[in-house]
Image: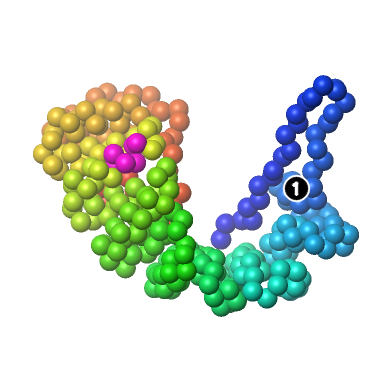
């Protein structure tokens, strides 16, 4: 499991007419995040507990305390804080159970975590939050059937975000439902027209289906949103080659090289096109960004070596 992720939100100093103005003080939650980043968890815990003793309705502090207690191995303490959070939010709010699920994951209790997400779904029977969280987490663990049923429930309850549709696409593809995966990814592209992950998914679906025109459209969609993505240009070159558009494929490979695509993948695709690779150039100083999706779908075809 990934380590506890914390993000420090720093106050921005805006200097006005008086030079005596200073930065706004950090909240206890922000201070605790900073301490955690410095691996000073004991101090962070003490700070949060002190803050909650004085301000018991500080919900952000209580949520962070739940995760930090679980991260440090105090699961009974985390459960106690979940109960305190639930008492303040009311019986129909699913978020305390979702927080408990996160805490259980940090303690590597995955079956109990999914049960907590299911309880969140039952607590708020019209909210997509519980089944969405359970479905996304189950997908990350590779539990495809478990993920599908929960994501279907979340979508039926109104989940319309790109991550939900992308994860459903991943799940459907792993369950060999190519048409269902394509439909989910297409919904994801409409949910967030600027996001790239569902276009990566559509490229993967097209490659599996040997739909080279569809693959080309999908790689064009990726590059329209991430113009410097060399691996997407590699995938585009592969689709062009399979369509018999060899001259365009070669130009795409040249462009992929300019964008810093993998030299070994470039050489292999050029070899298949009957063109020797040029002398090696210095490695790109910046690694092309990679998708952050659960499937981490490759942008080069699965039947092409990537080195």
Q: Is residue 11 visible?
A: yes
* Front residue (pair 3, 292): 292
Q: Is residue 37 left or right of residue 197?
A: right
Quadrant that contains the C terminus: top left
Q: Residue 282's spot in the image, x, y percent?
A: 38, 24
Coordinates of residue 4 in the picture (x, y in percent): 64, 56
Q: Position of residue 286 (x, y in %)?
A: 45, 31
Q: In this view, does 237 lie above or below 16?
A: below
From this view, report whether residue 168 is shown above or below residue 292: below
Quarter of the image holding residue 24? Answer: top right
Q: Is mark 1 on a helix, strand or loop?
A: helix
Q: Give the range drawn in magenta.
A: 219-224
| Residue 223 painted magenta | yes
Q: Mark 1 points at which residue?
A: 30
**Is residue 145 within the magenta segment?**
no
Rendered position, 305 above or below 114: above
């Amino acid at each position: 499991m990934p380590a506890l992720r914390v993000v420090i939100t720093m106050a921005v100093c805006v200097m006005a007419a008086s030079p005596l103005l200073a930065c706004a003080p950090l909240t206890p939650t922000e201070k605790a995040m900073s301490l955690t980043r410095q691996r000073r968890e004991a101090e962070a815990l003490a700070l949060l507990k002190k803050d909650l003793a004085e301000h018991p309705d500080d919900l952000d502090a209580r949520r962070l305390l739940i995760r930090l207690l679980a991260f440090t191995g105090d699961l009974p303490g985390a459960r106690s804080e979940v109960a305190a959070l639930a008492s303040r939010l009311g019986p129909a709010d699913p978020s305390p159970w979702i927080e408990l699920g996160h805490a259980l994951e940090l303690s590597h209790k995955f079956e109990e975590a999914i049960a907590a997400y299911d309880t969140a779904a039952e607590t708020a029977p019209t909210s997509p939050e519980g089944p969405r969280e359970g479905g996304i987490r189950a997908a990350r663990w590779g539990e495809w059937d478990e993920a599908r049923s929960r994501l279907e429930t979340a979508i039926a309850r109104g989940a319309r975000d790109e991550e939900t549709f992308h994860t459903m696409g991943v799940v459907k593809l792993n369950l060999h439902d190519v048409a269902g995966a394509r439909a989910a990814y297409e919904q994801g592209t409409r949910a967030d027209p600027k996001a790239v992950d569902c276009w990566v998914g559509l490229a993967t679906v097209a490659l599996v289906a040997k739909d080279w025109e569809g693959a080309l459209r999908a790689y064009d969609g990726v590059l329209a949103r991430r113009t410097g993505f060399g691996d997407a240009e590699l995938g585009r070159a592969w689709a062009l080659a399979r369509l018999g558009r060899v001259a365009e494929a070669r130009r795409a490979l040249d462009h992929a090289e300019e964008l810093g695509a993998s030299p070994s993948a470039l050489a292999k695709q050029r070899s298949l096109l009957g063109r020797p690779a040029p002398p090696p150039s210095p490695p790109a100083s910046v690694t092309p960004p990679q998708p952050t999706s659960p499937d981490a779908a490759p942008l080069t075809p699965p039947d092409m070596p990537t080195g």
